[in-house]
Image (cartoon, grey):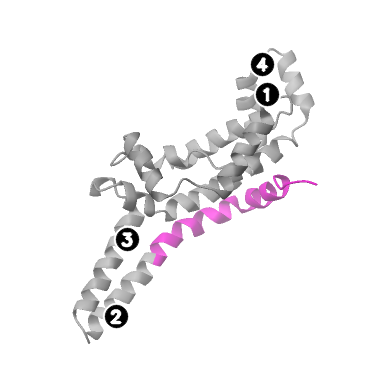
Amino acid sequence: MIGVVTHVFFCSMVAYGLSKRDLKFRKLYTVMGVITLFFSGGMIPTYLLMKKLGLLNNFLVYILPQLFSYYDVVILMNFFRQVPVSLEESAKIDGAGVWRTFLTIIMPLSKPALATIALFNGVFQWNDFMTAKLYVTKQSLYPVQMKLYELIVQQQAASMNTIGSIALSTTSKGVQLATIVVTTVPILIIYPLLQKHFVSGMMLGAVKE
């Protein structure tokens, strides 16, 4: 939940800035963002970076690396461009600064886009167990997905060690199916609540010709 909120807020701030055509070095920032869509540092350099930043066995490893996604920024940026400039000009005339305009006008008007990004990132973070597998060794910091992953691995190992045991094989299969239900139910509950915002957010935030 914390990761989703921080991700949405951070991407919103970046997108709002990039949506302004008079922003200095805007083209440079855009090119840098596009590069992140096609290239990454790789697993080993990323691990060394996390270690250097002190994020190994740190709860912040679930939040800080997930703050930015240029794909989400593009959706929000195109949505923000649909907001009438007259609203921001009226706010400036009334004495509102950039932050107040962003928080009290832009953000409330952008609920469909924000719901879309929240759903995207929420599903990703809910299903993510690789972050814990790579950067966390303390079991007290394991998310539910990592717990379920370990449970499946243990059940599979037990069934392999006992060759010909139908009971253990059935139990292992049952555990796998149970984990699928556990990981799917929260999304099935949340998605209908956000569906109308999700659809309109995707349509309004789509890249226009």
| SS label for mark 1 | loop
Amino acid at circle 3: Leu
Residue at 59%, 42% in the rendered image: 70
Identify the residue under disc 4: 96
> Percent from the top left, x then y, of residue 183?
41, 60
Amino acid at circle 1: Lys
Whether residues under marks 1 and 2 lie with C-beta atoms below 8 angstroms apart, the answer is no
Which is more N-terminal, label 4 or label 3?
A: 4
23 or 96: which is nearer to us?
23
What crowding class fits label 4: few (fewer than 14 Cα within 10 Å), some (14-19), or many (20 or more)?
Answer: some
Amino acid at circle 2: Thr
| SS label for mark 4 | loop
> Percent from the top left, x then y, of residue 64?
43, 37
Q: CA distance from mark 3 to mark 1?
A: 47 Å
Identify the residue under disc 3: 148
Q: Is residue 126 above or below residue 66?
A: below
* Drawn side of residue 158 relative to residue 108, left or right: left
Q: CA distance from mark 3 to mark 4?
A: 49 Å
Let me know if residue 114 appears in the view.
no
Which is more N-terminal, label 2 or label 3?
A: 3
* Drawn side of residue 94 relative to residue 73, left or right: right
Which is more N-terminal, label 1 or label 4?
A: 1
Q: CA distance from mark 1 to mark 2?
A: 62 Å
Amino acid at circle 4: Ala
Residue 117, located in which quarter of the rendered image?
Answer: top right
Which is more N-terminal, label 4 or label 2?
A: 4
Residue at 67%, 30% in the rendered image: 26
What span is colored magenta in the figure? 180-209
| SS label for mark 2 | helix
Identify the residue under disc 1: 24
> Percent from the top left, x then y, of residue 165?
22, 84
